[in-house]
Amino acid sequence: RSRNISKIVVGKPTGSRWREALFGSLVNDIIKQSGDIDVYVIRGEPEDETSTLPLVLRSAQSWPAYLFGLLVVALCSALGKVLSAYLSPPNLIMIYLLGVVFIAARFGRGPALLASLLSVIAFNFFFVPPILTFNVADPEYFITFGVMFVVALIISTLTLRLRHAAEAARRREQRTAELYDMSRELVTAKSLEQVREIVLRHMQEVFASAIVLLLPDENGRLTTPAGASFAAEAKEQSVAQWVYDLRQRAGLGTATLPGANALYLPLFASRGIVGVLGVRPQNPGAMQNPELLQLLETFANQIALAVESARLSEEAQRAQILIETEKLRNTLLSSVSHDLRTPLASITGAASSLLEPENTLPAATRRELTQTIHDEAARLNRLVRNLLDMTRLESGAVKLNKEWQPLEEVIGAALTRLEEHLTGRQVATHLPPDLPFVAVDGVLLEQVFINLLENAIKYTPAASPLTISARLLNENVVVEIADRGPGLPPAEIERVFDKFYRSRAAEGRGGVGLGLTICKSIIEAHGGRIWAENRPEGGAAFRFTLPLKG
């Protein structure tokens, strides 16, 4: 009345009439005290007595359990016969009580109740005068029988309760340990896929249920992951979306949309709802267990925090990628613009000088300016070619045109193209006479040699020699281009093939850091690998492999 309630709806009690007579009825009490409030009594669903505990905890009602109880009583009787010469009949009752305790602990209430009754009968038959009959000479033994039966029943009940409590405590400890393990793994999860994998692995074992973690897309629509068959149904998707939109649990075991095959819980974090957790238990009655539901809520809270953390981590990664991309773009634009401006400025300056009247410039100067235009145009051509090659390789537009050909021809073509740049250098070539042909794209492999040789020319003294060698190793041809320059800084050996990476020693030498990256892409497209090392005798060596199985 204080809350302005005008109608009360209660369920019809399902207990026995004897219990109602002894302890009263809540429904009757409500009706008597309702006054002017309408009371509606409705029929409820039968209570699902299925236990959520493991099978070993349930009262075993199978015939083997009852037969085993009968066997235990028989063994107690045999033991009592042996000890009857030394013990009085009241003391023999303890043997039967031990048997009842064992049956209660092992098989549950039903067999223990039968064992209690059989113990009274067996004690009367074997040990109460007249022996081997069901007659009782002394009426006082009826009190003994009654006390014996009640004590056996109480002991079996207490034993069963202790066993249930111990098993429940063990289960709680196990679930708490699983929750701790899951939380510890979720802390290290950096992506939503990792979170989903950890959640499924732990919760399926703890709750003996099919689990699905539904996360929203950018439009707020929940997406069903692969493998979640029950959540892929249209009805289940509608229930899950309702839970996400209205921020309330629904589905199996609830008063909202109970026709669903699973229970759906909203996942709340500090920034609001982050997803929905779906649980379809093998035993639908498990969703009526308050302890299990509370544990499920605890798991859901941990999962929500992990999902939010993973999203924040992914957002941070995307932001970092954008920062790095912008930084790389600025570096590239700065480097490319500088390397494009330098030859263009030289070409423009030389061309402007050549446009002056002929009598103002001597012939030698004109030739020098013409050579400058030629050299800078070639430099500009190499720069643009590297940029275009890298773009084509990354886009996958380059298709290998493999042909079986001798390696010395490819090396010879590269040396011919670099003849002018190699002036004054000794280039030694060491190729074994029995070196087999290799299946390669000759044009691309020639570019690899050109880029590696140009790199060696750029970073070594003008007169230092270069060595090109090859050898057969297992099913590969290993090619090496070595120099006798200063070598590579140890910290840069693993980075020299990175895109746009330029050594500190490259300052003032031009280039945008694509030559070695192009080499790596071409070699890997051929199925080989490329790496750099410092030589013990000094200088650097660039090696790559070419598989013979073209």
Image (tube, rainbow, N blue to C red):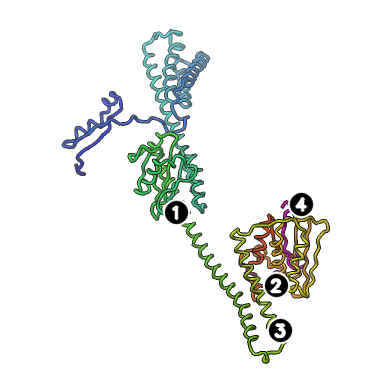
Q: Amino acid at mark 2?
A: Lys
Nearest to the eye among marks 1 and 4: give it: 4
Question: Sequence order check: which comes first, mark 2 or mark 3?
Answer: 3
In 3D space, how far apart are the residues under numbered discs 2 and 3 (Cα atoms)?
25 Å
Q: Is residue 383 magenta?
A: no
Q: Are marks 3 and 1 in contact (CB under 8 Å)?
A: no
Nearest to the eye among marks 3 and 1: give it: 3
Which circle marks residue 367 in the picture? 3
Residue 295 percent coordinates (x, y): 42, 42
Question: Sequence order check: which comes first, mark 3 or mark 1?
Answer: 1
Rendered position, 456 above or below 276: below
Q: Amino acid at mark 1?
A: Glu
Nearest to the eye among marks 4 and 3: give it: 3
Residue 358 seen in render = yes
Disc 2: which residue: 458
In 3D space, how far apart are the residues under numbered discs 1 and 4 (Cα atoms)?
51 Å
Disc 1: which residue: 308
Rendered position, 113 above or below 288: above
Q: Which residues are magenta?
A: 535-550
Q: Are marks 1 and 4 in contact (CB under 8 Å)?
A: no
Q: How many marks?
A: 4
> What is the quadrant of the N terminus in the image?
top left
Which residue appears at 39% of the width and 16% of the height?
A: 145
In 3D space, how far apart are the residues under numbered discs 4 and 3 (Cα atoms)?
53 Å
